Image (spheres, rainbow, N blue to C red):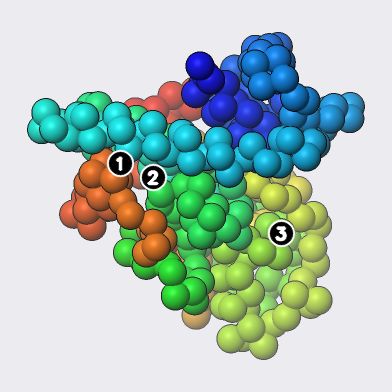
């Protein structure tokens, strides 16, 4: 009999192209991932991956197994959920895709409250880029996904999730920290740290600047980083100023390491949406979570100075 857990490991390696990254996503050691794949290969009598250094490339047999493995796991989950439903229970396993900020600061608290009501539901959070999450939604790899942009696609349905402010932060010792307010043209004189071009916060920032006739080539870009928390830490180290999500800046502001500075005429925010694929039938657990999004009050996760979650998270 084929092992469903081994199939889950196989799909994780196939998705990430790496044994180590699959292990991180599944909270397994790399040797455990390797052992699981080797056992599956022995059981099926076929090599599934070609190992190339740290990368793992699917063989022809591996490529053929991917859709069948997904269908088998989905069928097993539907079977389990149907049996629980007959007993009046909402149960099962589901995946929610999201960007880094929303995953860390928004979803944990919401999932915790949801599971207090439905303790037999297990929710896996898949952290990835916005474009990747949309692709996973359309492919049926995740049931729901958080997006900072409404992608026009006939198969996608959206629901309001959260309104996130995008704010300017500067080091605590910066001269602007005393006055707390500047004008858009003042930004041209300062080293600024940006997110990558496809990031939602960067899009919001550039839209706001363009309204004041400021384009990206006019900025004094000190560096580009792909992570909001890394940017906040770079600002703490006085490497530049930055526009970031208020969610990502909250801890640094609370500790007094960075300061929020208002920019005249630039009150920026982005809407976050929960999305689903209309073509994918929701299980009972997924439907309950979709309803929960509409009725639940979002409480961002907070941390104390040591990084430990505190009340309200």
x and y, in percent, of residue 109 in the image:
32, 37
Q: Seen in the image, is 289 located left or right of residue 168?
A: left
Between the residue at mark 1 and the residue at mark 3, the CA separation in whole angstroms equals 28 Å
The residue that disc 3 covers is: 196
The residue that disc 1 covers is: 110
Judge whether residue 123 can be spotted in this image. no
Between the residue at mark 1 and the residue at mark 2, the CA separation in whole angstroms equals 7 Å
Task: Give the secondary structure at mark 3.
Answer: loop
Look at 80% across and 67% down and name the residue there: 220
Res. 106 mark: 2
x and y, in percent, of residue 152 in the image:
49, 76
Task: Give the secondary structure at mark 2.
Answer: loop
Look at 61% across and 34% down and name the residue there: 11
Snapshot quadrant of residue 160: bottom left
Look at 75% across and 24% down and name the residue there: 46
Judge whether residue 55 can be spotted in this image. yes
């Amino acid at each position: 009999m084929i092992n469903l857990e081994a199939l889950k490991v196989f799909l994780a390696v196939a998705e990430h192209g790496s044994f180590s990254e699959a292990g991180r996503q599944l909270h397994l050691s790399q040797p455990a991932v390797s052992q699981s794949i080797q056992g599956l290969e022995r059981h099926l009598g076929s090599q599934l991956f070609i190992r190339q250094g740290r990368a793992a490339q699917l063989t022809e047999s591996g490529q053929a197994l991917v859709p069948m493995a997904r269908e088998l796991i989905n069928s097993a989950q539907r079977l389990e959920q149907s049996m629980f439903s007959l007993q009046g229970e909402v149960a099962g396993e589901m995946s929610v895709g999201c960007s880094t900020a929303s995953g860390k600061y928004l979803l944990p608290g919401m999932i915790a409250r949801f599971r207090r009501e439905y303790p037999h539901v297990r929710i896996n959070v898949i952290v990835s880029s916005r474009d990747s999450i949309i692709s996973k939604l359309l492919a049926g790899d995740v049931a729901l996904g958080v997006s900072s942009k409404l992608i026009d696609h006939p198969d996608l349905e959206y629901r309001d999730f959260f309104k996130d402010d995008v704010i300017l932060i500067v080091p605590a010792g910066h001269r602007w920290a005393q006055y707390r307010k500047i004008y858009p043209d003042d930004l041209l004189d300062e080293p600024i740290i940006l997110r990558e071009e496809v990031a939602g916060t960067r899009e919001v920032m550039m839209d706001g600047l363009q309204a004041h006739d400021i384009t990206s080539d006019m900025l004094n870009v000190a560096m580009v980083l792909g992570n909001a928390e890394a940017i906040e830490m770079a600002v703490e180290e006085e490497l530049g100023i930055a526009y970031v999500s208020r969610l990502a800046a909250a801890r640094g502001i609370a500790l007094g390491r960075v300061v929020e500075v208002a920019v005249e005429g630039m009150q920026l925010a982005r809407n976050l949406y929960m999305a689903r694929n209309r073509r994918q039938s929701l299980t009972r657990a997924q439907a309950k979570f979709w309803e929960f999004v509409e009725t639940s009050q979002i409480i961002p996760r907070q941390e104390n100075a040591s990084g430990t979650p505190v009340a309200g998270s």
